[in-house]
Image (spheres, grey):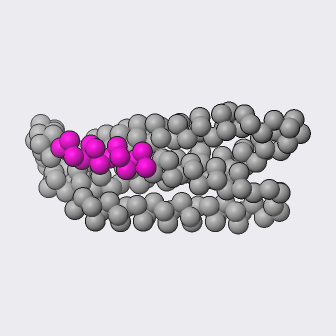
Amino acid sequence: MGDVLVLFVINEFSVFFTTIYFILSYSLSSEEKIQNMKKDKDKDKDKDNIMNEVYIPKIINAIFMTPLMALLFATIMLASGYVVTHFYLNIDLITYKSLIISSISLKNILILLSKSFIFGFISIFIPIYFGHKKEKDSYNRTNEVVKILIIILSMLLLIELFTIFIFY
């Protein structure tokens, strides 16, 4: 039971749901911010610093923030798993803790960290790419956001399937 719980919580759910949260709260607004900075830089004729000021810090932030958030989310999910097992299965804390600790391996932690690094990079790189690529203002912002969201989610699902084939 502990192996299945750890497999789903640490390797799958925490990474994917953390990335979804990161996309909805941070990544999709990055495209608009980049476009606004490009407009301001067009007025100043200083396009060289936009990479150092915007792109690299956002990518580094995404690469390091997503694994930390995934670890926090996995911890919260495992702690809430105790509440469920206590009420439904009558398992005490010591038994649950020993079950989870014996089920977590270094491989699970490395899979969590590697997937969250990759997911964080993908979730910020695609909005940055579309924000940089777009030249003029669009009147239909909702279609652009949905298009970017569909591209990001399809890339994440492809990476998820690829990692399932590799690790399992």
Q: How many marks?
A: 0
Return the residue nearer the eye: 98 or 23: 23
The secondary structure that dominates the magenta segment is: helix
How far across and how far down the image is residue 166, in percent?
A: 27, 61
- Give the quadrant of residue 134: bottom right
Return the residue nearer the eye: 118 or 112: 118
How far across and how far down the image is residue 75, in percent?
A: 31, 40
153 vs 105: above or below: below
Q: Is residue 63 left or right of residue 150?
A: left
The quarter of the picture where the C terminus appears is bottom left
Q: Is residue 82 left or right of residue 21?
A: left
Q: Is residue 164 left or right of residue 43?
A: left
The residue at 37%/50% (across/down) is 115
- Give the quadrant of residue 69: top left
How far across and how far down the image is residue 21, in percent?
A: 51, 49
Q: Is residue 20 magenta?
A: no
- Residue 40 in sight from this viewpoint: no
Return the residue nearer the eye: 24 or 159: 159
The residue at 40%/61% (across/down) is 159
The residue at 58%/61% (across/down) is 149
The residue at 70%/66% (across/down) is 143
124 vs 71: above or below: below
The residue stretch that appears in magenta: 105-118
How far across and how far down the image is residue 153, in percent?
A: 51, 62
Q: Is residue 112 left or right of residue 127?
A: left
- Residue 33 in sight from this viewpoint: yes
The quarter of the picture where the N terminus appears is bottom left
